Structures are given as C-alpha cells and as structure tokens.
Image (cartoon, rainbow, N blue to C red):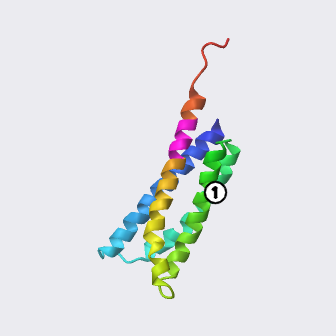
Amino acid sequence: MVRRHAFAVAAWLFVLGVVVQVFLAGAAIFEVTDFIPHGYLGWLLPFVPVLLLALALIARAGRRTALMSIALVVVTAIQPELAIARDRDPLLAAFHPANALLIFWLAWTVARRSTEMLRRSDVIDLSRP
C-alpha cells in the first residue's frame, strides 16, 4: 500500500513540476525573468519519470501504466535536446512546446491512473470475514 501511495505522490508532484516549468517559460517570454530557471528545471525534470517507472513497477500499477511511464521517460529525455536544437535545426526545435503538451498529457494520465489504483486498493471488501 505504501508503494502505491509513493507512486501516486511522485506522479502528482511530477505534474506539478511540469506546470511550474510551463509557468517559468511564460515568465521568461513576458520578461518577468530569463530562461535560466526554465532551463535548470528542464534538465532536472527528466530524472523524475525514471523514478516514476520504477515506482510503477514496484507498485504493480499494471502494464498500461508502466508503458505510459516508459513513454514519459522517452519524451522527457528528448525535451531538453529539442531546445538545444534551436541553433542547428529550428524546425526540429519547434517541437519543444508540442512535446511539452505530450509530456503534460502523459504525466496527467499516469497521475490519474495512480489515484484510481489507490481508490481501488482502498476499497474494503465487507463481504469477507
């Protein structure tokens, strides 16, 4: 049970991290700050889905959730590389915000699945002695 709670907490914290990352990009675009905080967080966030994948497997979250966690590892790993590509291949770099949408959707879906898994495991079967 603790493993499933850890998975759910980590999944929702990652969603929060993605939202903060988008806020930092917006703050830089509107010149509240520069892109340095966005860049720092962008290099840290890809490590979290690796932890999520491990927790999904430990929590026995199911095949589909594990596959979505694998996809999350892949798309977050390429996200900083897309930003770096802006000088040599701007068209490729243009996928950076689109990939961010994919990251958010996958993170949200994994987090929702983790919560549903918790709800199912918290149901007590009163028919059993």
Image quarter of the N terminus: top right
Neighbor class of circle 1 (other Cα within 10 Å; few <14, some 14-19, many 20+) is some
Residue at (66, 45) in percent of width and height = 63
Q: Secondary structure at mark 1?
A: helix
Image quarter of the C terminus: top right
Q: Main secondary structure of the magenta part?
A: helix
Image: magenta residue range: 111-117
Residue 102 percent location from the top left of the image:
48, 60
Please determine whether, in this image, residue 87 is positioned above or below residue 101.
below
Residue 13 visible: yes
Q: Is residue 116 magenta?
A: yes
Q: Quick one: which residue is furthest to the bottom in this view?
A: 88
* Residue type at numbered disc 1: Ile
Please determine whether, in this image, residue 102 is positioned above or below residue 62.
below
Disc 1 marks which residue? 70
**Residue 23 sits in which quadrant?**
bottom left
Q: Is residue 48 magenta?
A: no
Residue at (55, 76) in percent of width and height = 81
Residue 125 percent location from the top left of the image:
61, 19
Q: Nearer the viewer, residue 100 or 92?
A: 92
Residue 57 percent location from the top left of the image:
69, 47
Residue 52 visible: no
Q: Quick one: which residue is furthest to the right in this view?
A: 58
Q: Is residue 88 left or right of residue 70?
A: left
Residue at (43, 69) in percent of width and height = 97
**Residue 8 sits in which quadrant?**
top right
Residue at (47, 78) in percent of width and height = 93
Q: Nearer the viewer, residue 41 or 83?
A: 83
Please determine whether, in this image, residue 75 is positioned above or below residue 12.
below
Residue 66 percent location from the top left of the image:
64, 49
Q: Is residue 117 left or right of residue 105?
A: right
